[in-house]
Image (spheres, rainbow, N blue to C red):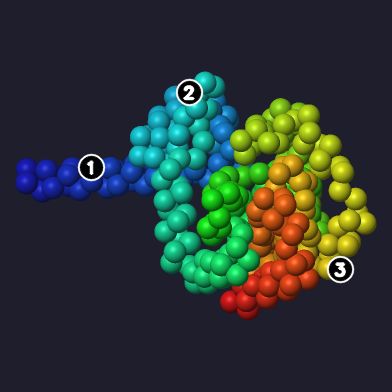
Amino acid sequence: MTPKQSIARRTKLHTTTDSSDSLQSLGRALRVLSLFTEDSALGARAVGSHLDLSPAVAHRILSTLAEVGFLEQDSIDRTYQLGWMIGQLGDAYHHTNRFHRIARQVLRELSVLTGETAVLHVLRNGYRVCLMQHESTHPLRYSMPLHAPMPVTNGATDQVMRAFASESQVEEIRIVIERTTDGREKPTLMGLDTKEHLKIDFNSVTEKQLENVRQSRYKRGLGLRESGVGSLATVVRAASELFVLTLFGPRDRIESLDESETVAQLLTAAHTLERN
């Protein structure tokens, strides 16, 4: 083998090794990100335990993901949670996905028709997650944090989810409640779901109430989760997932709506989503 051939061979081996190492690192990073679909906050030791990595390697991956915005670190307990870049990717997906394009149009039309904020939630891993919304133009209006996971308890949106969820989904909902009340999960959404009230709210919903929701296909809530907020919610089954379409507004405005007319508008919007 000539010196030139030897150098070329070493260069090729070095390049192949670098490529293999890069792919391995990428695979680890993606597996780390996938853990956050099950836990909202994780530290290096927990990540290392899940993926059989040393805390040092887990910390290095977490730090790298945080540097580019895929994760954010809590300044108090030093755990990591999903970062702004995930929201950016999610928004890009929603804009390009056909169902989500149609959903945005439906929400806009429903909000204009009723004068209230129209919101689309999806049930994911035992949580309700706000995918998108079209806000009311009223100075006083309701706005839901996007992509924020919330335990499913006793609100109108929650009751619709619980009424139409499968047995396995109901079990996931129950597990989230238990994990939050015993301290393994943090209460979410601006502290509304305190551990003291979470289980009480969850258990306040009876099977008879859920059966009524199944029969009528909608639920009106007046101050169920927040005293000053009213809502009307209905189920949407599309893209093999369980969605809930909800109108939110100040309690007195929701209470003053013509319920039969507004429910008809809500159900029509839901049927439009299900057809697409």
Residue beneath disc 1: 14
Mark 2 lies on a secondary structure that is loop
The residue carrying mark 2 is: 75
Residue found 83% across the figure and 68% down from its top: 216
Horizontal relation, residue 67 to residue 205: left or right: left
Q: Are marks 3 and 2 in contact (CB under 8 Å)?
A: no
Mark number, residue 170: none
Foreground disc of the pair 1, 2:
2
Residue at 65% across, 53% down: 249
The residue that mark 3 highlights is 215
What amino acid does circle 2 point to? Answer: Ser
* Label 3 element class: helix
Give the residue type at disc 3: Gln
Q: Residues within 10 Å of mark 2 (few under 14, many from 20)?
A: few
Examine the rendered structure and indicate whether residue 247 appears above or below residue 76: below
- Residue appearing at x 54%, y 51% in the figure: 139
- State how far apart marks 3 and 1 are (Cα): 66 Å
In-front residue for pair 11/218? 218
Front residue (pair 186, 35): 186
